[in-house]
Amino acid sequence: MIRWRSARVDAVRAEWPGAVEYAVTVFEEAARGAGPGTACRALAYVDLVGRPQVGDRVMVNVSALERGLGTGGLALVVADPDRMPADPPAGPGHVVKARYTPLQAMVLGVDEQESPHHAVLAEADSIDGMPVVTADLHSALPAVVAGLRADRPDAVIAYVMTDGGALPARFSRTVAGLREAGWLASCITVGQAYGGDLEAVTVHTGLLAARLVVGADVAVVAQGPGNLGTGTRWGFSGTGAGEALNAAHTLGGLAVASLRVSEADPRPRHRGVSHHSLTAYGRVALVPAQVPIPLEDSGIAREVRRQAHELCAGSGGRLAPVDVPTDGLDAALATSPVRLSTMGRGVEDDRASFVAAAAAGRHAAARIPTRE
């Protein structure tokens, strides 16, 4: 299940909070470091494995890399045997994430008994009408936030990262860039995901923490980078978007379903409104939600509108379609402090994808409740 290799660290390519990307030379296990090796990129999470130095021999996991899977295109540093990191300082926290894997991490959960916020969350049961935008793909996050900020640049926005994709929040350069630019007030990692500004056990406590601890006006819920799909009706990690709508409504929030849209995906099941959105919102979600639809007059916009209205009509009134004007959203997307990319396609290649996400953000901005 894991393809282990030995590698030599050759250079530092890039780094961002909590992660370092290296140029390494990877050797076949049988060679034990002999022979010419193969050059590639490798990522180390500093909190887990320390900070390897140039010349170090490290153990790497190349399983996804050798299968040619898209996310990251990286080997992952598992250990630097000759430069083990120091033990973390003693402190509270007993929530274990990535549980029972070799790299399980113990963190302080915002909702656990040792947390300074436990008393606030112990009996908390409402997010007081806070809009919660759910999305299938991590790539929607900066576009949703751009749409929010287009009309409400003062909004306090929290990102609740689920464990459908990458587990370490540190993998996301998008989150790092949005946090650095001040576009996100907090990243909250839930479930098995870890490494956010706050850790929570479930999406429910993640949303409660967003509202009651961070003081967020809006929360965006989406999986981390990466998306598992099998080409089947139910076998994709984005079903979590429907479950997130259920959590948002249960806690008294305004559930907003951001549509996954594409005008350039070569796969028919993702063209227009993706079958992921149709299943997650049409079948997995069981609660009332609003479905923002970009109000434009183009071929792809008309097709998205048709599919979205069909989705809502089939919900028996549970899903409410909402037309959202898109004037100014292209300019808003252009201000993003991070690169906009979905499945390797940028705005110039798949504008409809990003405009649909930005429209959801704009709709949420207009529904931010006034605080008493």
Image (cartoon, rainbow, N blue to C red):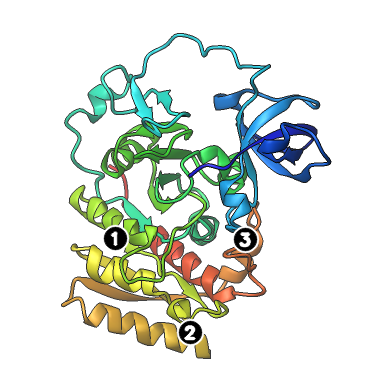
Q: Secondary structure at mark 1?
A: helix
Label 1 vs label 3: CA separation? 24 Å
Q: Is residue 21 shown to the viewer in this render?
A: no
Which callout, 1 or 3, points at the residue further toward the start of the chain? 1
Q: Quadrant where the C terminus lies?
A: top left
Residue at image position (26%, 43%) is: 204
Labelled disc at residue 242: 1
Q: Position of residue 18 (x, y in %)?
A: 60, 31
Q: Which residue is mark 2?
A: 301
Q: Are marks 2 and 3 in contact (CB under 8 Å)?
A: no
Give the answer, above or below, for where 344 lies relative to 203. Answer: below
Residue at far right of view = 36
Q: Position of residue 266 (x, y in %)?
A: 55, 79
Labelled disc at residue 159: none
Which three-letter amino acid code belongs to the residue tagged 1?
Gly
Q: Horizontally, is 281 left or right of 355 in the view?
A: left
Residue at image position (59%, 74%) is: 351
Label 2 vs label 1: CA separation? 23 Å
Quarter where residue 349 is shown? bottom right
Which three-letter amino acid code belongs to the residue tagged 2?
Ala
